[in-house]
Image (spheres, rainbow, N blue to C red):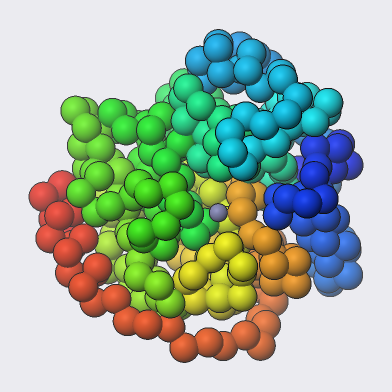
Amino acid sequence: MTCIVYSDDYLLHTNEQHPEHAGRLTAIMDYLKKLPFYEKLVLTEPRKATEEEIEKVHSHEMVERAKRVGWLDMDTYTNEYSYEVAKLAAGGVLTACRTVEEHGGNAFALVRPPGHHATSIRSMGFCVFNNVAIAGSMLAEMGKRVLIFDHDVHHGNGTQDVFYERRDVMYQSIHLYPHYPGTGSISEVGEGKGEGYTVNVPLPHGAGDECVNEILDEILIPVAHQFAPDFILVSAGFDSHHADHLGGLSLSVNMYGEMIRKFSTVQPRIVCSLEGGYNLECLPKGVASELGVLCNMPVIFKDNVAGRECNDVVKKLKDVMKEYWEL
Ligand SMILES: [Zn+2]
């Protein structure tokens, strides 16, 4: 069973002048409804996360600050609905995880605002609360080993921050580097007990499918197998697509499905959660590519683009990770 978690209430948090506006989600839903597999998907209503659940990851002060209407940082807006919608976004991923935990299968939480930049003490980068980190922390509390894979073009500094010293939740990220928010170098590998449990893949401008496939096959998937997660959460950001205005990587739409296919060989319990993606033509296709793989009715798009090789990154990262994993 593949479930999608969605509510029209996610559209209430919006600002038409901002790239992260409600139209992103309407574009996705409109597109999905036209696809043959849509009928197979189980549409599930999200619940709101409680303040207690949110404060397992975020400080009380940060949660209080998020109730304000205006700007939480230079690029993170809130309107009169945002606080409740942000709780519904965090709760959406919790709902998706709970459904997968109880009924098996997999899920895609089509939520907004996104989450992966929100640190334990700060909303930032369009993100109010860290939806994936809140879900990861709930799963870890249930005794699960959790792998978070982040394919947004931006490094998920918030998620890394939350789990940096833990070994029960692994964070793997591919991202353009250097780029916003500035973190995510190879040498950031975790700290204390968590050393070796953060895997950063900083990619050069223009890196594409071939490069990411190599990284996955030679490093991320072998490390994931050794970590042996009970659950995989995907921070699904589609601004890593070659046509995204906020990006700089050269992934094709089909690569999103391919990444999910590879991770499902490690653990089929997968919950994807929407992060970035601002090209309204490509974003819905990226989601469709992942959902097609999740529900076993893959869709293939005509979308080929030549990417740049990244042998340097593969070699350097392998050298660093060999210290912790068999590679
Ligand atoms: Zn992003």
Q: Position of residue 9 (x, y in %)?
A: 86, 36
Instruction: Give coordinates of residue 145: x percent, y percent.
Output: 40, 35
| Residue 19 visible, this angle | yes
Residue 274 in picture, x, y percent from top left: 65, 50
Observer able to see residue 292: no
Q: Residue at x 56, y 88 (%)?
A: 304
**Which of these two is toward me, 88 or 3?**
88
Q: Indicate the position of residue 175 as horizontal and vertical percent values.
A: 42, 59
As drawn, is 76 to the left or to the right of 146? right
Query: Looking at the image, is 13 positioned above or below residue 234?
Result: above
Above-or-below relation of 86 to 208? above
- Which quadrant is home to the C terminus? bottom left
Q: Nearer the viewer, residue 317 or 184?
A: 184
Describe residue 230's horizontal placement relative to residue 75 as left or right. Answer: left
Tally of marks: 0
Nearer to me, 306 or 109 = 306
Residue at image position (33%, 74%) is: 214
Q: Is residue 181 left or right of residue 200?
A: right
Locate residue 62: give its quadrant: top right
What's the residue at 53%, 87% (across, down)? Answer: 305
| Depth check, front residue: 16 or 186 | 16
User: Would you place residue 83 above or below residue 272 in this image?
Assistant: above
Q: Residue at x 69, y 67 (%)?
A: 279
**Quarter of image, res 280:** bottom right
Left or right of 162 on screen, residue 42: right
Q: Quadrant of ligand 1?
A: bottom right
